[in-house]
Amino acid sequence: MIRYDITPTELQTLIDARVPGWRARTKTRTDSFRDLGKYQEDSSIWSEVKPVFMEIQGRSKCCFCEKKYEDSKLGRYELDIEHFRPKGNVRHWTLASNLAKEGVMLTAPDPGRRGYYLLTYHLWNYAVACKSCNSALKKDYFPISARYDLDGTNPWNMKGEKPWLIYPIGQLDNDPEDVIDFYGYLARSKATDHHLKLRGVVTITFFSLNDAILRKELLKDRALVIIVLYRLLLKAKNGDQDSTTSVSEMLKPTSRHTNCARSFKRLFEFDEVEAAEIAELSEQFYLSGSP
Ligand SMILES: [Zn+2]
């Protein structure tokens, strides 16, 4: 994960320019949810702003796993608008045993099966995520450690819920790169602050970011990034300008697995022998089980 920086004003301006009238239409819908006291929708209109979020997020990257997809013409079918705080219902997430041992506590969601209905059309409740991260893993979960504020109207004022998952758009939450980095193709929680460290562990576990069986292809994608980057870093070190340019490209937010690439570059600069070992292990992993 990385942060995709944008201010509320910039986001609003982008939405107004690309989807004129969308905010006015959603205000009407949100007002009706307020009257009803719950989410109730026959036809949603959040997909209309999906291309804007795809553009913001490094041009079509999943906000959680950093896989990259085609631009909005095709990529919109592969990426979902994710409601970070679920709109219609918050399901109880079963805590993995390793997290319980680490001291992660979960608040039980409202048994009345309600969600954050007033955030259905809140821009700061959106991100785009791949089908694996959103439909298969995120679902209607939103693990927190404090009290659910299901009547909340603005995520910027809801940090007191103490969400476990990290939200990567703008400055609303911690910078994901302050929480998670990578050792080789594997994610690791890096913060020194205890609670933040647990947030990293929960996020990695929740999205199975290191599961070599469930997410084998994701891990192989990251291994491939390391293999290519290592070769470029060696050439760049010997003065090859094209390789230097290519390394810069691989570290940009618009590249796939930017956090992993940046982490590996830091390792290369810190300890080249260890980086060589990691590149070798990445190559072994990438080739393992390939047809
Ligand atoms: Zn994903």
Image (tube, rainbow, N blue to C red):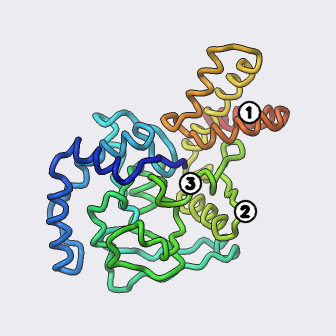
The kind of residue tagged 1 is Ala
Foreground mark, 1 or 2, reads 2
Q: Which mark is residue 192?
A: 2
Query: Which residue corresponds to the image point at 71% horizontal and 19% vertical from the top-left?
Result: 236
Foreground mark, 1 or 3, reads 3
Give the structural element (helix, strand or loop) at label 1.
helix
Residue 71, quarter of the rendered image: top left
Does the closest atom of ligand 1 sit within 8 Å of the Cβ of label 3?
no
Residue to which mark 1 is pinned: 279
Q: Which mark is residue 156?
A: none
Query: Which residue corresponds to the image point at 49% horizontal and 76% vertical from the top-left?
Result: 160
Counting other residues with Cα less than 10 Å from the Cα at mark 1, is it few (<14), some (14-19), or many (20 or more)?
Answer: many
Of 94 and 213, the residue lying toward us: 94
Does the closest atom of ligand 1 sit within 8 Å of the Cβ of label 1?
no
Query: Which residue corresponds to the image point at 22% horizontal and 47% vertical from the top-left?
Result: 16
The kind of residue tagged 2 is Thr
Of 244 and 281, the residue lying toward us: 244
Residue to which mark 3 is pinned: 175
Give the structural element (helix, strand or loop) at label 3.
loop
Mark before the other along the chain sequence, 1 or 2:
2
Picture coordinates of residue 50, whole percent (x, y)? 30, 47
Picture coordinates of residue 5, whole percent (x, y)? 47, 47
